């Protein structure tokens, strides 16, 4: 299974775009990239997933490089409520066991 | 539409005791997964239940067992509790081609 590497922490100014990187250089052709976030004292929340095309939903955008070895989660206009730990996970199926690493702690500052 | 609900929210036990945690999945979901999250770490997969059978299992000892009922709800049982079992226990539900939805967990403290 592909492993992921994320920076341990990042800061972002409120109202600005937050760009969270993830490296997954050993990803297989049938593995998707999933992003979850966990706000303090809550369970993880699904954000978005993709295979090789860029994806966008009401929460975020996911940009996957052409070689699929890395990706970036973009929160276009970060708010204080976006302060959370963000996890990048690579798995084949949505209901596979999600293998969470340490994630990136994003702090959105006023 | 209720999401994933877990009970109780907090629990205190002593070493050697047994505990049962409960999970009701999101409406329309038939698969339940359990995770353990130690303080400051990401969640670790314990096992997954589908059609009342354990389908996948992570690297956890046999002291951890589970059950899924016909209505898709699930229980996590832990026997012979150790201090190291203190953690947040998360339940996630899903169905095929649907992302996993997590509850807010049960905080278990072992004294």
Image (tube, coloured by chain):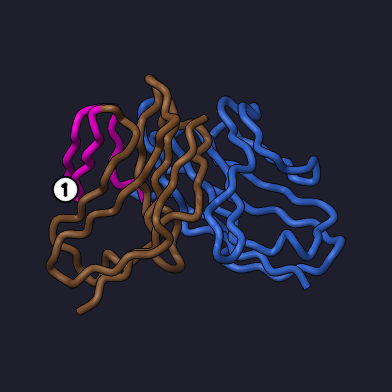
Chain colours: A brown, B blue
B39 vs A60, left or right, is right
Image quadrant assignment for residue A81: bottom left
Report if residue A54 lies within the magenta region: yes
Q: Residue furthest top?
A: A29
**Where is residue A53 drawn, in percent x and y?**
20, 29
B82 vs A78, left or right, is right
Mark 1 residue crowding within 10 angstroms, few (<14) / some (14–19) / many (20+)? few
B51 vs A25, left or right, is right
Secondary structure of the residue carrying numbered label 1: loop
**Where is residue A82 drawn, in percent x and y?**
27, 64
Report if residue A59 lies within the magenta region: yes
* Quadrant that contains the C terminus of chain B: bottom right
Q: Which residue is mark 1?
A: A58
Q: Residue at x 39, y 20 (%)?
A: A30
**Where is residue A5 drawn, in percent x and y?**
44, 47
B59 vs B55, left or right, is right
The front one of B100 and A88 is A88
Image quadrant assignment for residue B12: bottom right
Q: What chain does badge 1 belong to? A: A
Q: Which residues are magenta?
A: A45-66
Count of numbered badges drawn on the protein: 1
**Where is residue B100 drawn, in percent x and y?**
42, 40
| B63 shown above or below B109 | above
The front one of B94 and A35 is A35
Q: Residue at x 50, y 47 (%)?
A: A100
Q: Residue at x 29, y 53 (%)?
A: A20
């Amino acid at each position: 299974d592909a492993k992921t590497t994320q920076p341990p922490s990042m800061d972002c100014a409120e109202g600005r775009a937050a760009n969270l990187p993830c490296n997954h250089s050993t990803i297989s052709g049938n593995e998707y990239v999933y992003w979850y976030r966990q706000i303090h004292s809550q369970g993880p929340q699904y954000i978005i997933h993709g295979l090789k095309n860029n994806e966008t939903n009401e929460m975020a955008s996911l940009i996957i490089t052409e070689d699929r070895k890395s990706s970036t989660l973009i929160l276009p206009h970060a708010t204080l409520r976006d302060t959370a730990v963000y996890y990048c996970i690579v798995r084949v199926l949505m209901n596979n066991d999600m293998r969470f690493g340490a994630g990136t702690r994003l702090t959105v500052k006023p | 539409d209720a999401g994933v609900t877990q009970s109780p929210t907090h629990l205190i036990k002593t070493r050697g005791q047994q505990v049962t945690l409960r999970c009701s999945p999101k409406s329309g979901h038939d698969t339940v997964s359990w995770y353990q999250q130690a303080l400051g770490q990401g969640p670790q997969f314990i096992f997954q239940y589908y059609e009342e059978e354990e389908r996948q299992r992570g690297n956890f000892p046999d002291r951890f067992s589970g059950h899924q009922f016909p209505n898709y709800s699930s229980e996590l049982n832990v026997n012979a509790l150790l201090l190291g079992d203190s953690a947040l226990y998360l339940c996630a539900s899903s169905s095929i081609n649907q992302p996993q939805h997590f509850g807010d967990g049960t905080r278990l403290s072992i004294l």
